Image: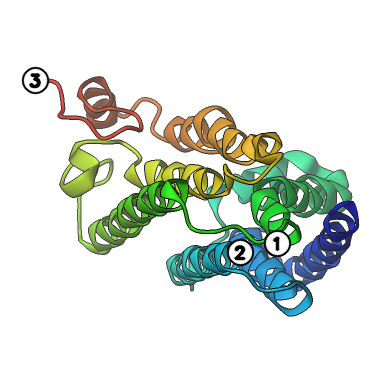
Amino acid sequence: MLTLFLKCAFIIWLYATAWYIIALYKKRNDVADIAWGLGYIFICVFLFVTQAHSAIPLLLYVLIVCWGGRLSVYIYLRNKNKAEDFRYRQWREEWGKSFYWRSYLQVFILQGFILLIIISPVIFAASSEPQQWTLFTWAGLGCWLLGFYFQTVGDYQLSVFKRQQKPAGTILQTGLWKYSRHPNYFGELMMWWGIFIIIIPLSGSWYFIISPVTISFLLLFVSGIPLLEKKYDDNPAFEAYKKRTSALIPWPPKS
């Protein structure tokens, strides 16, 4: 298993370096967002080609390909013909002369390291003895499907809203966004917790709870909700929306 993890780590390093070169050529680091979902697919293809096939790893590959493919296409279409995402543009200005090496380490290599942590349950399943479908498989799959629904529908509703001509500062408050300020993030977490639930019957699986815990921590406290909502500081409409709407878990809004 350790050998397989090291091989995946090496592949991810090459993958991250390649995207760093693309970012330099494009002069925009937000290509890292497109690379994020595709990186998981890349690892799944490697595992499919090099490892023995059994039902659970194959199920995980399919789930990862569906999630990563949809997400990367969505981000590509969202960013197409637009300026570099505000987060990366801000870092470009803040980092000054150290921009090049900090971009490589703090954007691409760090993202690759996080990718390895989050996909670790899939690598673990691929290197384990074959596992039969159990109640955990069905429970995890149900959790994943619910998450995929929330992320896909949430992203679609947001993209439709952004195409409409709205006054500056208007906040999306309909559809899934009526019940959660970040239904797409809720969906993301549900999918990764679902993947972990699927591998629970495997011996030693509890070490890999680090995967959903890591993505939960990042979205809740680091690069997800806090960074995105900071953009709406001093927006009265968002402050009112924030007071009555759940941050993550869908829930009826307060009166």
Q: Which mark is residue 231?
A: none
| Label whose residue precedes the other's in the sequence (1 or 3) | 1
Q: CA distance from mark 1 to mark 2?
A: 5 Å
Viewer-nearest residue: 188 or 255: 188
Image disc number at residue 255: 3
> Depth check: 123 or 249 in front?
123
SS of the residue under disc 3: loop
Observer-nearest of 145 and 182: 145
Asked if 173 appears above or below 243 in the picture, the reply is below
Q: Secondary structure at mark 1?
A: helix
- Does 164 appear above or below 109? below
For mark 3, does the 10 Å Cα neighbourhood hold few (<14), some (14 to 19), or many (20 or more) residues? few
Q: Which dot marks residue 57?
A: 2
Query: Does the rendering let one see residue 34?
Result: no
Residue ID at (41%, 54%): 141
Q: Which mark is residue 126?
A: 1
User: Colour mode?
Assistant: rainbow
Q: Amino acid at mark 3?
A: Ser
Residue at left 14%, top 21%?
A: 254
Q: Residue 147: where, in percent of width, then height? A: 37, 50
Q: CA distance from mark 1 to mark 3?
A: 49 Å
Q: Are marks 1 and 3 in contact (CB under 8 Å)?
A: no
From the top left corner, tell me how far across and down residue 193 is, in percent: 49, 42
